[in-house]
Amino acid sequence: MRTSLSAHDKKPWLNGSLSPQERAGLLLQELSLDEKMAQVSCYFPRDINDTGDFAGKFPFGIGEVSCLEARSAHLLDEVTDFQRRIQNEAMERSGHGIPAIFHMEGLCGAYLPGAASFPSGLGRAAGWNVEMERRIGGIVGKQERAVGVTHTLAPVLDISRDPRMGRQGETYGEDPTLASALGVAFTQGLQGRDSAGRQTEAVAKHFIGSHHTEGGIHGAHCNIPDRTLMEIYAKPFQAAISVAGLRGMMPSYNSVGGEPVTASPRLLTTVLREHMGFDGLVVSDYGAVGNLHSVQRVAPSLAEAGLAALRAGLDVELHVPQGFGPELMAWFAEGRADIALLDRAVEQVLQAKFRMGLFENPFAPDPTERDTSFAVPADTAVSIRSARESLVLLTNNGVLPLQPGIKKLAVIGCHATTARFFFGGYTHYSMAEGKLAANASMAGLTTSSDAIRALTKTVPGTTIEASDGPVFEELLHQQKPGIRSLLEELVGRMPGTEVAWAYGYPIAGDDESGHDEALAVAAEADVVILTLGGKHGTASIASMGEGIDATDINLPACQEQLIVKMAQLGKPMVGIHLDGRPVSSDAADQHLSALLEAWSPSEGGAMAIVDILVGDHSPSGRLPVSIARNAGQVPVYYNHPHGSSWHQGESIGFPDYVDSPHTPRYVFGHGLSFTTFDYTELSVSTGQVMATEGFDVSCAIANTGERAGTEVVQLYASDRFASASRPVMELIGFRRVTLEPGQKTRVNFHIEASQLAFLDAGMHWKVEAGDVDLLVGASSADIRLKSSIHIESDARIDGKDRSFYAC
């Protein structure tokens, strides 16, 4: 006869042999209403070294803790101490030892001292490197777990067709297949487990359609047809769920068809959970629940907003309780609101905590274990290689690579003398730098005042805050000691060349006061390098970023006009563009000898750019977006339906605008190399296939030039005739292939017919009988080989089980 109870008998939810669902169900039964409300709430400390307000705000524990303010830490010990201190309090106050989930952004690396920083999402997409993205995700997860963070707010799986939106640089671009492959890889890398059993769960964002907003304005309303919503915008999310086991989701701020996503049962329950098969934690974007009341006005009170979000399928409110506050708790106590809604959300939170291993290992690792995840040379090498692969050579008349013997090189532009411009939005540096700005622009954390704005020095002709004080440079070198600017890298790598610099122009506006000096410096040079673009980042010091949208997508007048003036000198001119959105410039196209798109290359930026300039590496980046000529052309994207854009048809209208071509300035998939590649010997394994089968496509690629290089082989499909309007072409697979001069290899793709499925008239996923053309090439407009496949019969399929990209 037993005389005492084991720990598992007393607290059966601690039995690790049970599933997370079983453990969560057992623990849920023990929780009071106060404890349940705590689990769907978030603590947001303004200073990780001053958290004395936690106990008063959350006397019953907490569901999530924001680690955004780790961006200001100077030492990892500060972050570890913060995590352990709050975790201990959270567990003590919960009444049942329930640990908190600590979350942090992770798009371009952790916000931690010594953490690796990576190029922007759009830059990494230009690398078209799935394995690289998996490695980057693995580094981010490893470094965040090392300080006890197991919820990483990444990857960004938004599809972007609008460069006016300031957040375009966060995305993987315009193509759902490319975004799916990269998003799956990042999620797989991120959702790792450490030796103690802590498991990271990725939180993909922003579900769904957030870049389809009216006017390119962040968070604005989206009118998206259901077919476009599911075939284009949902595809990367579905791929991450189905292939990578994605466990976290963040709804977008915007409304879709009149429904704010945060309060949409159709989108968060019917579509996401029932149709797409998502079974994880849904957390709000910062302040999104409050927005239902104060911005979108679909709820007459904050409590009504919270209840609407719970009904829709939201589980946790970030970053502070607004809707999930005392009034809503009273409604549950009084029976005015159905407690089952709260129980469902709490159970999801508890399941996540059990999956993450937090009940067994709630605290950040010891410093000796922690520090092995930082300052790792191999991680730095990944960042440098990613930066190098992200660079896209758009034009080149032969001036690149720079030839030996250049006596004098002129470098023009405000970006050249500091590495600050390498760090785009959602890097550690940009987030820390944003705290130095007069006005914050991050949604959910916006601060602004007329008094501050009146005292702020601005870039001439703009409302952008000038950020040329030493405090910004001091912060950069505190985070990245010894980091080189582009000018410093050029001087170091070209010892036999005199390198002269002139400011030239700022990041925006029409200030031409620096033009004369720049022209004088350029007149004495053999070759001129111009750094172009704006400031991708956050807050009032940036020209592009979260909440920093624009109607002008071209170079600012101060830069455009200097290119025109400098062309009169007759010097070879090389443009290097740094920004979140891609370069678009008439003057650059007309007058520059070469143009390199560098995006936001992060800590490896200077080395990567000079590697290309001097020819130590051949450029291999390819555009993940189509580049519009101007904002009046937006949206312009390659996978538009038959009968639209520059395929609208001769019988319908003239082939161009009266003042511009219909075609983009640069096409999706475009990018030049320092060598040439030949495509031959296309082979398709069969001429016809059943809807439930697959087939293989292969071709031979040869390096026919005199230098080693990497080609990005792109495979497209085009449905000849279909029962619904289909894209003129759509990417279905891609491969990076590195070859020595004269080397030849064979590139293979396996395609499941289900990848060619689309939504029929009844909005069911269908593989349709008919002929599909297969196109292989170096870009969407540079097709080298063609064949076709015949699908013999129709078949309805489950959309979550379809194939998403070629293997």
Image (cartoon, helix red, strand yellow):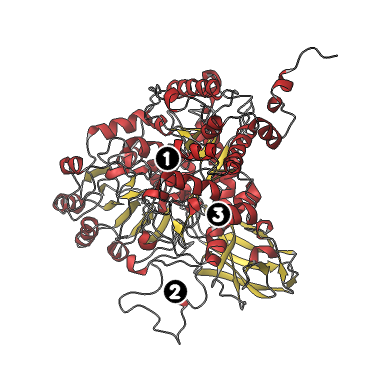
Determine the CA span between mark 2 and mark 1: 44 Å
Q: Earlier in the sequence, mark 2 or mark 1?
A: 1
Give how far across and how far down residue 699 sits, in percent. Answer: 64, 64
Q: Which of these two is toward me, 170 or 251?
A: 251
Q: Quadrant of the C terminus?
A: bottom right
Question: What kind of element bears circle 3?
Answer: helix
Give how far across and how far down residue 226 sits, in percent. Answer: 54, 65
> Is there a contact, CB below 8 Å, between mark 2 and mark 1?
no
Query: Who's the residue at 56% across and 21% down the image?
Result: 369
Q: Residue 645, labelled with which disc?
A: 2
Compared with 801, 245 (above or below) is: above
Q: Quadrant of residue 432?
A: top left
Q: Residue furthest top?
A: 3
Determine the CA span between mark 3 and mark 1: 20 Å
Left or right, 315 with respect to 555, comes to: right
Give how far across and how far down residue 399 sits, in percent. Answer: 35, 57
- Would you call the spot at circle 1 few (<14 residues within 10 Å), some (14-19), or many (20 or more)? many
Q: Amino acid at mark 1?
A: Gln
Query: Who's the residue at 58% across and 26% down the image?
Result: 98
For discs 3 and 2, the disc positioned in front in the rendered view: 3
Q: Amino acid at mark 3?
A: Pro
Residue at numbered disc 1: 322
Q: Amino acid at mark 2?
A: Ser
Give how far across and how far down residue 198 sits, in percent. Answer: 61, 29
Q: Earlier in the sequence, mark 3 or mark 2?
A: 3
Residue 397 seen by the camera: no
Q: Residue furthest right?
A: 1
Determine the CA span between mark 3 and mark 2: 34 Å
Q: Residue 265, labelled with which disc?
A: 3
- Would you call the spot at circle 2 few (<14 residues within 10 Å), some (14-19), or many (20 or more)? many
- Would you call the spot at circle 3 few (<14 residues within 10 Å), some (14-19), or many (20 or more)? many
